[in-house]
Amino acid sequence: MLDNVDRIEPPAPDSFLREYVFRGRPVVITGLFDGSPVRRLEDPAVLRTELGAMPVEVREGDVERLLRGEGEAPGRRWPFGRLLDHLDADPSAVERAAELPCPPELAGLLEPPAYCGSGEVVSHLFAAGPGSCAHLHYDGDLCDVLMLQVTGRKRYVVVDPAHTRKLRPEDRPGVQRTSGWFLQHLTEPELDAFLAWAGGWHCVLDPGETLYIPAAAWHWVQYPDTAVSVNFRFWSCRALRLLAEVVPVRTVEWQALAAHFRRQDALGDDDEKVLAELVGACRAGASPAAVQALLVDLCARLGLDVAGPPLDTADWDRRRATPPPDLPPPPPAPRFRPDTRVALADGCSLVVPLRGGGVVLARHGRLAAQVGPDPTYPWTLGVLGRIDRVPGLPATELAAGALVDVDTLTAFLDAMGEAGWVQALDAQEPVRS
């Protein structure tokens, strides 16, 4: 398979931003770390001599564990040299050290490139053996990434978010941001055909080369050799950081907006208004379902690719589902007095008592809250049950039945009223017995 990623000498920072970051294009930069002490680690013998005693956390790199719902394998501490020897001795070994905070012994040998800007930069270490791979995915922090190949080779596939609907993105909890395609199981001709269809880039990174992976881009990684690499992660603009830190969902619409705001040289006032609307809704406490509904609307408003017709049944199912809107906030509850007649608020109901005590409350047919037994106020569940059975009893009668003073009971009713669970009945409404 031919590489189709540009290979260039280190460009000027403004040219790098304009030609690659703003346009979401990967690029291989040659010689970026020439002259840095890290370059001598290209020799595996030197790497073992200088960093062999460095402790790293090692995990089994079975990338399909999470997709099978089995969770991540437990880690264990090894000297780095032991891991490298193990990988060289057993080509089928699944152990690896991946996405670990870059140890100080290694971090001290290289500085973040100027392309990372003056903001926060995070660095990680990756080491794995032949055949190991990282499943096709995109990153949840929306950082741009510079990946330096220290020793060995790594193979990369990068796909722009404009082609997300071709990649069968998963929506299941725990595997969001993950593609349903297993590129590691495709033959070379099949992978060629897939990349031609999905508009993907492909390259094999040699020691000393640095790959730029755009924020929000899909990427797949495979190790032809035992290989070690170090990355630098940075936010190229304020919008990406806001989307990563403020928005509580990780869906393809969120990814599409990130790719849109990555193009800083082409944004206008309307784009700023869209970003402000989304961030404002999240900071105001909108539910994840409401945020997702807003993301869908904003993508359609901006004409982004994910708003087009579905390409497969998974895309169809994902797009036709309508998230439930936020329930309107309950009206302010009146102050409960001893003679106030009490009922459950409109649309609210008690569902069933729970084993061991407690009740489940529902609002408009949806389970919405659970109230457990309170050892300090053991009468509260009985009061709720009586309000449900006999709406319209005055607070004084409820207090007498619960063997509690009326001031304590009305304080409880005030709290439940503010939460929208109980209301005061009009004096003309009949009492139902």
Image (cartoon, rainbow, N blue to C red):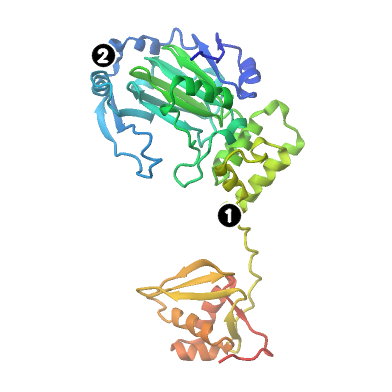
Mark carried by residue 287: 1
Where 249 falls versus 11 (above or below)? Answer: below
Mark 1 is on which residue type? Answer: Ser
Name which quarter of the figure residue 195 lies in: top right
Where 322 falls versus 184 (above or below)? Answer: below
State the SS at label 2: helix
Mark carried by residue 49: 2
Residue 285 seen by the camera:
no
Residue at image position (48%, 23%) is: 191
Mark 2 is on which residue type? Answer: Thr
- At label 1, counting other C-alpha atoms closer than 10 Å, the crowd grade (few under 14, some 14-19, many 20 or more) is some
Foreground pick, 292 / 118: 292
Image depth: mark 1 or mark 2 in front: 1
Where 383 falls versus 84 (above or below)? Answer: below
Q: Residue furthest right?
A: 269
Residue at image position (62%, 59%) is: 326
The image position of residue 29, as x and y in percent, is 52, 13
Foreground pick, 261 / 367: 367
